[in-house]
Amino acid sequence: MEVKLDKRYPIAASVEQCWAVLSDIRATAGCMPGAQITEQIDETHYKGTVRSKVGPAVMTFGGDIEVLGIDAAAKSLDMTGKGADKQGSSAQMNLRAHVEPGEAPGTAVLVGTATITVSGKLAQFGNRLLVPVSDAMLTQFADNFRTAAAAVPVAAPADASALERAETTAEEGAAPVAAAATVESMSPGALVAAPAPAPVATPTPKPVKELNALALLWIVLKNWLAGLFGRRKAG
């Protein structure tokens, strides 16, 4: 059984802050409820786990993640993840996501297309349950992504170098000879000593929390009840 979701989530953080999270596979995986990367095989392959809580019982599912492509210019990520439990149920998610500027300055929009394929006992729930549960999971993912993106330090613009200031002075009317003399009087160390922009670091993912299946089902139930009573009032 296959479920496809197209989502757009507004983020109160800049495109650069959002991309710092999206381009970091560990940080992105850490935003998914209950998910955690446990091992990196190579540059594009990872192993991970998903912890799910149903009442007092906590179950752990193992899986694999493959990064199909990262485009820094387009701010896009293409990846796939798959896993299975001991009872024979399996799930696979193909995710394509990118970041684009938001309507207001300093904001962004996380755009994603997720195709989820399930088999075994999971497929018995049908689209009526799988679609709202998947939607609720992605909503939690977006909330965690917002928190992670907002925590990314904003890189301060680098100070103009002494050479740039000398060139600016010359353009504003100073004699070219004086500007050249200013440049010649600089020591090599002064030209090299201009501070470089600080690298943007992604925040360390918080300890993984198990996915609460009952909480997700409660969200689905509340949405169903809200829709039901909404239709009755409209009628």
Image (cartoon, helix red, strand yellow):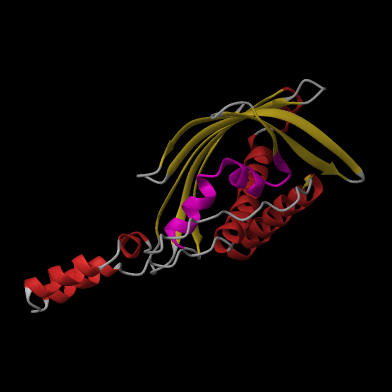
Residue 157: x %, y % from top left: 38, 67
Q: Quadrant of the C terminus?
A: bottom right
Residue 103 coordinates in the image, percent (x, y): 38, 65
Q: Is residue 197 visible?
A: yes
The residue furthest bottom is 173
> Relative to the observer, which residue lies in front, 168 or 231?
168
Looking at the image, residue 41 lies above or below residue 35: above
Residue 23 painted magenta: yes
Farthest residue, direction right: 56
Along the line of sight, which residue is nearer the eye, 3 or 187?
A: 187
Image height check: is 219 above or below 71?
A: below
Q: Which residues are magenta?
A: 14-36
Residue 163 drawn at (x, y percent) = 24, 66
Residue appearing at x 36%, y 64% in the figure: 194
Q: Nearer the viewer, residue 119 or 22?
A: 22
Task: Give the main secondary structure of the magenta stretch.
Answer: helix
What residue is drawn where x is 15% and y is 70%?
A: 181
Q: Is residue 75 covered in magenta?
A: no
- Location of residue 66 in the rendering, given as x and y in whole percent from the top left corner: 56, 28
Q: Residue at x 45, y 62 (%)?
A: 14
